[in-house]
Image: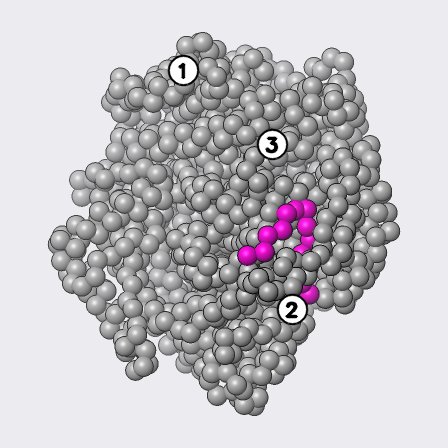
Amino acid sequence: MIGVDVGGTFTDVVAVRNGEIRTVKVPTNVRDTEQGVLRGAQDIGVSESQIFNHASTHGLNAVITRRLPKIAFLTTLGHRDILDMGRTWRPVEGLTDAAWRRPFGDAARPLVPRYLRRGIRERITASGDVLFPIDEEQAREELRTLQECDVAGVAVCLINAYVTDAHEARLRDLIREELGDEVAVSISSEVSPLAKEFARASSTVVDVLMKLIYGKYTDRLDSGLRDLGFTGDLNYADCAAHLVPAEVAMRQPFRIVFAGPAAGTMSSAHFGSQIDLGNLLCCDVGGTSADISLVTAGVPFVNTSFELEHDLIVNALSNEVSSIGAGGGSLITIGEVGELRVGPGSAGADPGPACYGIGGEQPTMTDACLLIGIIDPDGFAGGRMTLKKDLAEQAFAALDTPIGVDQRVRHAFDIGINNIAEGVVNIAIQHGIDPRDYSLVAYGAAGPMLLPAVLGQVRAREVVVPPHPGLFSALGLVSSDLVYSESRCSYTLLDGDAAPHIDAIFTEMEEALRSRLRPEEREKAVFVRSLDGRLVGQSWETPFVEVPEGTIDAAAMDQLVRNFHKTYGERWSKTFEMMPVQGVTYRVDAQVPADKVSYPEVPRRTDGDRPSAPVPTRSLTLRYLSESDQAANEYARVDLRQGDRIAGPAVIREPMSTTFVLAGQTVEVGRVGELRITREES
Amino acid sequence: MSTAAPVRLRDLDDAAFVERYGADRFTMSVLSSRVHYVVQHMCSGLLNTAFSGILRDWYDFAATVSGPPSDDYPMGSVSNSLAVFFGTMADGLRNAVEEYGRDRLREGDLLICNDPYRTGTHVNDILFIRPVFHDGEIVSFVTMRAHQLDMGGVVPAGFSATKHNVYESGLVLSPQLLYREDEPVDSVFHLILDNARYGALLLPDLKTIYQNLRLGERLLHESIERYGAEAVRGSIRYSADASAEAMSNAIAELPDGDYEGEEFIDCDGVGDDVEYRVHVTVRKRGEDIEVDLSGTSPQARTSINGTMLDTKTAVGVGLKYLLDPTSPFTSGTYRTIDVVIPPGTIGSAIPPDGPVFLYWEATMPVMMAIFRALSQALGERAIGGDYGTLALHNANGVTNGVPWVTTAQCGGEHGPWGATRHGDADSYEVIYMANNLDPATEAIEADIPVVVLRKEYVADTAGEGTHRGGAAVVKDTLWLSEAEHWSSALRTKRRAGFGVHGGNSGSAAATWLFDREAFDVEQERDLLPLNGGVYAGSTPIAGVLDPETKEVDLENGRYFYFASNPTWYTKPGAQFRYLTAGGGGWGNPLDRTPERVLTDVRDEYLTIEAAAERYGVVITGDPVRHPEKLAIDEEATRERRARLAVT
């Protein structure tokens, strides 16, 4: 089986065959993404695999860069501007700044320009009554204008369509009649039949964009893979890193827009299950950002929506991944009152850190690590690049601050580490967990280098550096089950009287799922029900309440309400059991277990082994970290064996990654070669 | 004003720094960002579990972390929510604690106060104060100010410009305990719930707020355990000092001088005989700035006044926008800012006859008068005016025996901002003084018997400029059952969204009422039109309108008075229409490129006629039916622009 994770710069390919993990990294082809994927697939021998699992950020990147297909947005007359308005909320940086603009507004970079957002004369009320019917002549006139504008897709979100889809369904027929079958169409009552029009509208817009971006791409990828001799199944990962057959994914492609970051969380969860770790703080540190997520008792923390950029909401189940502007490329600057700052800006790949020598003049975390001596100037990125210490030094020297260069480097490193630590602690607080019960999984290009240093502040149990940390997210694509899912919305007071209604919803969803499963999957599938609900009077839901199996009768409803209060208490640390509960979203997942990667065990040293302990490749001098220089041993990860223990300070190298173990820390090599770093008890 | 200039933070040596703040620079950076997280966690906890719409869908609350009495209550961090709360929270905390008695506070207490004259804003905003103790001493306070759906008084939910005094406005709570050592004080709960409506929403909201303050307290305790009480206290002082320094640096860059500006409020709820004026003189010397409100009108006879604490907020937030928009807001922001205001003005009302409820309607003009005063001195850094009045709609009724209420959902609460040197403005924001969520149409319609028929932008309303202001918003609401309404568009006599740096002002605001006979949506199977003589059949609520056509006509029209009926009663099928003001433009309109003008025509922000008249750009084609076939008549445009340039 093969997993492919298409990032902005690199496409990571992993293959698991006969228990062995192979990896390939190829540059991402931004224009013709499938070309990079196919190259990687060929390099790794795709014809020998039966499963090809895929996650790609190019849909996300298309949104962020606005290199988008031309689409229209149709809504109820009088509401064409809901896409411009968003929820009006400004982020903290826009609090007292009149220069702030809604990033997707007409004054900035709209996803759909105003002239392609059009109102249709119709109105349905909150109770589902028709206030006035759809004016088909007017609708056709608007559609003829869209045809003249040659739009490739149409997103439809009418007010109150979460109550009834009647007008949206009719409008879709009209679109087909006027614009033909070639135009992609998504209607909100199918994409996300939830109340609050903006989130439903933005989800629908993203859906139709992804249909256009991923539809043809999938065809090209599929035929390219067939040309390479691949005869197996092509699956996509969704935003919760569950696998979905490609043809199913293409029906609701808004669900795959954020799959890349989610895959890292899934990779951590599965990896944890193999080494008996259930509680994980997952941290992917790259060049520009640290993506932090949470796994508790083996299960990723899932949200019911996420934002592609500020306030641009997509209503899709997603592994919660918080991104902070802290990575290897984070820029070091001097603030208003003379304080040293690290990030959130980043030098990116171009101009890159000063030491790359390709135009970057500001110092970055990478420059700090190079000057400290953690990074090997000759062995960077698998030896493809030689770093220049003098340029890094010059960049630090040029900062406008009275403190000496030594202190600048040291403070920069400490503050960069602190920023990541704050991000991790922040996630822990949001979820009410104690980091001491959690292991911090360190991956991404800079994760193993920077994360052990946060242990002092985060007070997690340990830092765990998994095998292949640089391609660990791609491994998440061979760590997951196939999941078919159905959901319905119905704003219903949960009491005994509602039992037949709720029962009918679940029965219908489960039948729909059964009919979709392939025969060989029906046997293995496990059905999991859940519900999102709220206390009457609230307008925000408490998600993932457990729903009893079997027929929903009055007793089951009673249990359901009790489950709600329990979930509410766990999530919000208080309960209001006297208040009635309203159900909103009802969900069934059919989980079909899939083959997953199994990490091969690393042998122990035995008595006869020579050497009997790991031998350093050389000794390094680490500067700036403390008052005096530190001597540290450098090791090659490939030389390490299960059970090896190394005292910090130490640097452990592998081709695409460097692990830095601090003084006062110890690293022990685990069963599958994972590096487990702990602090000595203070 | 500041006395001896303090040593700049960046010039402090390490030892002096530790001496001053109780820890090194690095620890201060760590702690100040942590304190900010504490504030955010308190807020997100409340937002996601609140019950009343004003909290859960409007985000009408804020949180802070402040230092102890012995440090004089520095406020080190505020949440990214309502700026109208910022300036009052530090003073409110000090006033409430000092009056209650700092020595009477114990660990586990929750102190509350809602009196506008003591703590700012209005009675529905309760200030909740939780002292954080360490070793028997107060080290810090976590506070929240959160809007309660009702606080008694003569108008359900309270938002009205027609209340005459403190007694009509609502229940006043002097500083008192809601919890004593984590036990509820029953008498205070009863006092609130016996005097306020909608207790079934208030009670869980109060409990939820209490829980979130406990969360903030716990998080601060964790920081104290790790870094020590001295460092945590020091970090709050450090945050205040850092923002004081940022603000005074920014002030220093403005040229010295005296600058004047003024703004007006149409009238109060007693009669339309008095127009209210806000006058500011900004005196700037070195790093110091004084904002003098002498010449401002006496307090109004109804609840449109603000207190001097609210005026202080408007001054601080206004100067932040203009001079130092990006550094965090703290109590230190005010260190080199002085506010002079005589008592008993519309911006410094006193009880009992200077009632306060729509306080922002008095203090937004303060902020806008400062924007105007400094617009010349700022040159290209000037900021255009926003839509100027929340034109807040407050209504209630009983449907099928169940009472309902709506507030700040169905009027002109959101609208455009003014343009800046950075570009065109957004058309749908809340006033500069606030930051909030916009309640979803579907959430409103699910709660109350109303249909929000129209919520969109109107062509030819944005103030023209090289960068244009945001467009005016029109909102039509159809009321399905009988209801009573309070409507408060308070600034319609002038164009609120003034232009700057050579830009033009946006269009003026107005409000109308249409009964079913004037326009029956169900029968017409259509929305109320935007033009074509429709207004003649309306009842004007507010605005300067042509007496016959009842269309907006600032030059020749007559003012229609928002409180000509203090309460508007409507039958089923009635519609309110709110038209906000347009936002102010920035820069000479003739410098806007013809291509951008064409885009505005294509997007129906501008009509072809207005493009020619106001921008001198001659465009041909049909923007509605053939939007991509519009063309610029280059020659006619050159000619027209040349002609406009000399007139």
Tell me: residue B443, above or below residue B127.
below
Residue at 17% x, 53% y: name it: A557
Decide if residue A551 is on the left or right side of residue A211. Answer: left
The residues tagged by marks 3 and 1 sit, at their Cα atoms, a distance apart of 26 Å
- Secondary structure of the residue carrying numbered label 2: strand
Report which residue position mark 2 lands on.
Answer: A10
- Secondary structure of the residue carrying numbered label 3: helix
Q: Residue A655 in magenta?
A: yes
Report which residue position mark 3 lands on.
Answer: B32
Q: Amino acid at mark 1?
A: Arg
Decide if residue B103 is on the left or right side of residue A69. Answer: left
What x and y, as percent, mark residue B326?
Answer: 66, 38
Q: Amino acid at mark 2?
A: Phe
Residue at 57% x, 86% y: name it: A224
Give the magenta range.
A643-656
Tell me: residue A574, above or below residue A504.
above
Decide if residue B465 is on the left or right side of residue B120. Answer: right
How many numbered marks have been drawn onto this rendered protein structure?
3
Instruction: Name the image quarter holding residue B251.
Output: top right
Residue at 17% x, 50% y: name it: A558
Quarter occupied by the N terminus of chain B: top right
Tell me: residue B171, above or below residue A247.
above
